[in-house]
Amino acid sequence: MIDSHCHLADDAFQADLPAVIARAQAAGLERVLCILDSGSAEEAARVPRLRELWPAMRFSSGIHPHHAGKYGADLTQVASTVTAALTAHDAIRAIGEIGLDYHYDFAPRDVQREVFARQIAIARQRRLPIIIHTREADEDTLDILRSAGESDVRGVFHCFSGTEALARGALDLGFHLSFSGIATFPRAGNLREIAAWVPADRILIETDSPYLAPPPYRGKRNEPAWVARVADVIGEARGEAAADLRARTTANFHALFQP
């Protein structure tokens, strides 16, 4: 089993990181994909310890739409920041999370779009998958993937919580959908319905920890071990044994993010 999206370099885990990793391994996780902020020197400095504690851990790095405003229209700085992060060590497997967030609008929307498109271009050049964050920006996200990606970029819509139309649009572009603890919430029946028909070779599971803990852990810091709960719920929605869902999503992870 693999947690395809977590933030173990976050401040929330630094006090008890060895215990968090031990619990994940005891729960049956073979690895996680740890998401890094390309512009964060603090997170970059934590990578050696993370790799020492869990050599199988893999990483992704990118500029989140919340942080796009720091770069303004300076796409040269975007490229240099992301490229430096990608070449910092040999365990990077993707660019992300990147995308658009029109809910919080922490950065101007035009800047978000430019920074997103520039990172897609880098992913195409480096033949790396991308990890997409999109919130209340469905059409712009798909449009930029079509134009900047030119059907030549792959990746995953992480922490999927969108509509059936967004799901089908993402799948039509060749992307995976990853389901988090949100899909286990009592009122998330619509997400479980989508998870039920996603093609078997396009589905992933994640925690997005330290956020979005699934029941019965709501209100607590989320952690990778609890991706098992996501697997149980998604497997039930698909009419699959949890063990089969875990094996399938593990195979999908390895196919998308090369070991």
Image: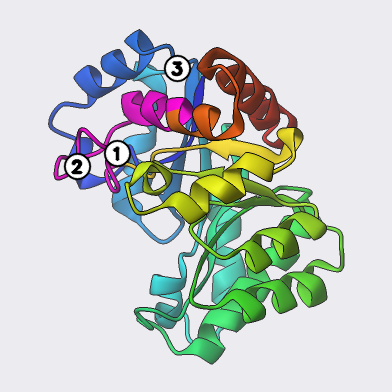
Which label number is shown at residue 214?
Answer: 1
Q: Element under label 2?
A: loop
Is residue 181 among what the camera can see? yes
Q: Element under label 3?
A: loop
Q: Position of residue 167 (x, y in %)?
A: 66, 59
Residue bearing mark 2: 218
The answer to which of 105 and 71 lies nearer the viewer is 105
Q: CA distance from mark 1 to mark 2?
A: 6 Å
Q: Quadrant of residue 256?
A: top right
Relative to 163, say whether 43 is above or below. Answer: above
For the residues bearing labels 1 and 2, Cβ distance under 8 angstroms: yes
Q: Position of residue 58 (x, y in %)?
A: 52, 31
Considering only order in the chain, which callout, 3 or 2, is on the residue closer to the N terminus? Answer: 3
For the residues bearing labels 2 and 3, Cβ distance under 8 angstroms: no
Is residue 153 among what the camera can see? no
Residue bearing mark 3: 29
**In the image, 233: left or right of 110?**
left
> What amino acid type should be assigned to the residue bearing mark 2?
Arg
